[in-house]
Amino acid sequence: MSGHGQKTRKALLIVLLMLLTPLAGCFGRDGDDVGVDADSVLTIDGLSASDAVVRAGEFHELLLMGEGLRISAPAHDVLFFVNGSIDIDSSVPVDGDRVQLKLLTTPYTEAVELTIYDAEGRKTVLNPTVGNGTPAMSGSEWFEKMDYITCDTPSADCGSYNFRWMGSPNAQFERAASYFQGHFEGLGYDTHLMRVIDTLNPTQPESLNVVAWKEGRTDDCVQGMGAHMDIAPPAGPPGGGTWEGAYDNTAGTVSIMLLAQVLVDLEVECDTFLALWSSEEEGLRGSNAFANNDCDACLPQDKELRFYINMDMMGISWPAVKENGDPFPYHAWSGPDIDPEVQDVAITSILDHVHRNVLKAPMDLRIEDSYGAGCDQHWDDHYNLVMDVHEDTFGRSDHVTFRDLGAQTIFHLGAYDADYSAYHSPTDTLENMVSVVGGQENLEASIEFVMWAAMLEFLFADQTPEIRNVGA
């Protein structure tokens, strides 16, 4: 071969090596033992893997084809769903010659890594493009629903479901309860208006709850989420009562409505209730009526109550900031917290994992001042902690009803009395919430974060057998 031919061949080899180098980094293992061709075995939303875009916060359909293959991802960045339930390990094998699954990222995910292993353990690593999406739990959708519920004059664009004071009779409460019932029924849930006269004193409020049921895979356990839909009555302390109750607790009510939209397309391990309680402001009487009475919609007494997640006063919280620049506090308390020196319940690990690893919250963000938020057992450690996520005995909302029955519980709460002057007052309006956090965009960001936290807590807890009734 001539010198010119040798140089040409050498140049071609160099070019070939340059072309193969990035492919080895993307599809091979340590530069050799190249795995499968991703585009020939994996589709995302019906597209070849290399052409797909993962939209942050949205569900995506995956199809992996090939006997002996497995797809994995970092469990804190990518969530897989198989047969309608979350796969906690984010590692799914092919059963037979193919497996269908869903992929979900959080709205905060910036990069996705998927690894396909063949039967010999060789791997193919993919980094699909991540784009902006419409989150499954959306702050903007929450705001639209809040605006529809709290607006003033009923019309085609305004529901005006205000004045939700629990009492007998209150036509406005009845009207709102029927609207909420229709929301769950429209999604296909087995939905009940649960009415209980739980006192011999006719001047005291009755209980009128909206309870939506979803059947689980097993019939020996029950679990749920809820929020109270009633608001502080006129002349109620400390601010004189309210008619919108935007923060307390239309915010939590709408969050449960949006969660129902996500959960309807998923499967649950235990029979699950999504509930809007009445009479929380009168002493948790709505949730107590549900938990301790015998009726078609009531809590089954012959099934193990595993866990309950509560949503009350949400949205005025991190990442929103106060006028002085300090962040609003964010609270997520698990229980029962029997011994303040040790972790008592498994659901606390879920709470920590979701906030620390999946949502990557700033767990050690502190300010110099204190919040006066009232966490009972750990005040010395957490009085100035912004991301206040831990076990605690704090009560004063409907999670106490279920904690008293042995359920493992999580209670979500934003700014408390000291940081929200409109608490239980006529100024607790959606307009005021927007003003307090410095704009609609800030409010949507804050509520979206806590809704994602609660949704993920539920999905992980549903598939964690260690989360049992403390009396089991």
Image: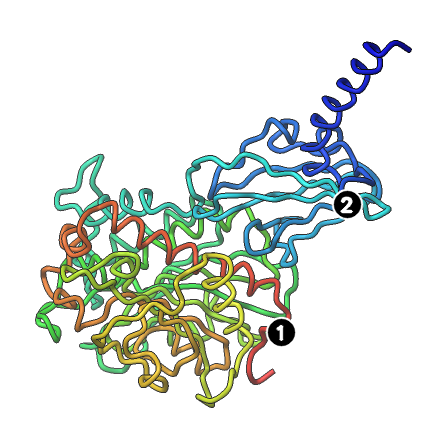
x and y, in percent, of residue 200 in the image:
27, 82
Residue drawn at the location 77% of the way across and 18% of the way down = 12
x and y, in percent, of residue 107 in the image:
43, 46
Q: Residue type at mark 2: give it.
A: Tyr
Above or below 27: residue 306: below
Q: Is residue 296 left or right of residue 321?
A: right
Q: Which residue is mark 2?
A: 117
Above or below 118: residue 13: above
- The image quadrant where one finds the N terminus is top right
Q: Secondary structure at mark 2?
A: strand
Task: Please identify the residue farthest to the right as the structure is shown.
Answer: 1
Q: Residue type at mark 1: give it.
A: Glu
Residue drawn at the location 58% of the way across and 30% of the way down = 52
Decide which of 413, 19 is in the foreground and name it.
19
In space, the residues marked 2 and 1 are separated at their CA atoms by: 29 Å
Colouring mode (rainbow / by chain / secondary structure / one colour): rainbow
Asked if labels 1 and 2 touch by Cβ distance under 8 angstroms, the answer is: no
Q: Which mark is residue 176?
A: none
Above or below 451: residue 356: below
- Disc 2 packing (10 Å; few <14; some 14–19; many ≥20): some
- Disc 1 packing (10 Å; few <14; some 14–19; many ≥20): few
Q: Which residue is mark 1?
A: 466
Decide which of 109, 235 is in the foreground and name it.
109
**Pair 2/1: label in front:** 2
x and y, in percent, of residue 250 in the image:
26, 57
Q: Quadrant of residue 371?
A: bottom left
x and y, in percent, of residue 105 in the image:
52, 46
Residue drawn at the location 19% of the way across and 47% of the way down = 439
Q: Quadrant of residue 388?
A: bottom left
